[in-house]
Amino acid sequence: MLVFLQQVINGLAQGGIYSLIAIGWTTVFGIVGVINWTHGEIYMLGAYTGYFVTTYLGLPLIPALLISMAAGALIAMAVDQFGYKPLRKKGVLAATGFITALGISTILRYTANAVFTVNPKAYPQLVDQKLITICTISGQPLTISSLHLYILIGTIIIMVCLELFIKHTLTGKAMLAASQDMQTLGLMGVNAEKLIKVTFAISGALGAAAGFFIGTIYAINPTMGALAGLKGWSCAILGGIGSITGSLVGGIILGIVENLTAGFISTGYKDAIGFAVMILVLLIKPSGLMGYKFEEKV
């Protein structure tokens, strides 16, 4: 039981990171209607931004995180400006957006590979790493590392800020309305292009935050965004596309399942079993855990 609970605790921080990626996916898809495959590369570039500002500028945890999020937001807006906006103007985004996203993703990945090289890079130690005892079970301590605790707290703060922004600001409410009917929202005087830019900025900031957090735990490399992007999309589907809460739940589930698999079976199977759980849930409930129903926008 102790080992089980320990793996669950460890999986919470990992799941929070997946949730950030998933929410970035679902916001763009829900409002713009495009599967943004560049999101994994923004996650990767956010991780590298964090690496450079902590290693060469010596910035502490919070300023480095904020700079990484700002960089992710700018990169995401640039992707929209030069990749998706021209297609929207021509009315062909739905037909060619997927291929465009794959193309931009490939360009970003291999450009990063050429610039940063394939050698993995590790962040400097940003916090004092120690084990914090949560409770004692049968005389054995249930612990969480201080780094995982900081990541979990940071993830929760970002989620709460996002929820407050969406529910208590005009722009956030407009984003919710746009996810239902962007055309009608435009007729009501809302600047659709500005709203899309805000959406991409939020998505990019979330992806970069996830990349920064993962960089504090593991070494980073230019291809790290490929699998992370797939996992983020899987979490979004698992929780229910269009649901921020669903993405959060999906990420937590995947993080916990992966850690339990690594702890009780083998680290080599954790990715496969994580995706198997997603497929199983979708076979039982195709709309995802939070019950979002896919409807055609007319």
Image (tube, helix red, strand yellow):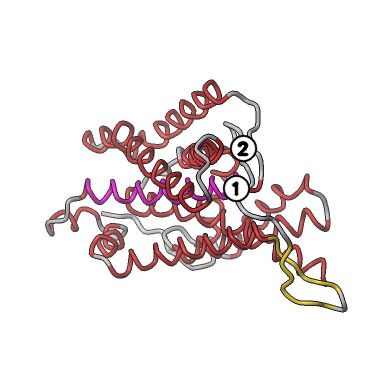
Q: Nearer the viewer, residue 52 or 41?
A: 52
Q: Nearer the viewer, residue 242 or 59?
A: 59
Q: How would you rate the neighbour count of disc 1 (Cα within 10 Å): few for under 14, some for 14-19, many for 20 or more?
A: many
Confirm whether the magenta stretch covers residue 199: yes
Q: Which residue is mark 2?
A: 220
Q: Which residue is mark 1?
A: 214
Range covered by the magenta-colored residues? 193-215
User: Disc 2 or 1, which lies upstream in sequence?
Assistant: 1
Quarter containing the C terminus: bottom left
Reply above or below: 119 against 134.
above
* Amino acid type of the residue tagged 1 in the rendering: Ile
Q: Nearer the viewer, residue 132 or 172?
A: 132
x and y, in percent, of residue 152 in the image: 58, 62
Position of 6 with respect to 217 (left or right) is: right
- From mark 2 to mark 1, how far is it between C-alphas? 8 Å
Quarter containing the N terminus: bottom right
Q: How would you rate the neighbour count of disc 2 (Cα within 10 Å): few for under 14, some for 14-19, many for 20 or more?
A: many
- Magenta stretch: dominant SS? helix
Q: Secondary structure at mark 1?
A: helix
Residue beneath the point at 22% across and 46% down: 193
Residue 70: quadrant of the picture: top left
* Amino acid type of the residue tagged 2 in the rendering: Ile
In the picture as drawn, the residue positioned furthest to the front comes out as 58
Check whether the beta carbons of the residues at disc 2 and disc 1 lie within 8 A of each other.
Answer: yes
Reply above or below: 29 against 247.
above
In the picture as drawn, the residue positioned furthest to the top comes out as 114
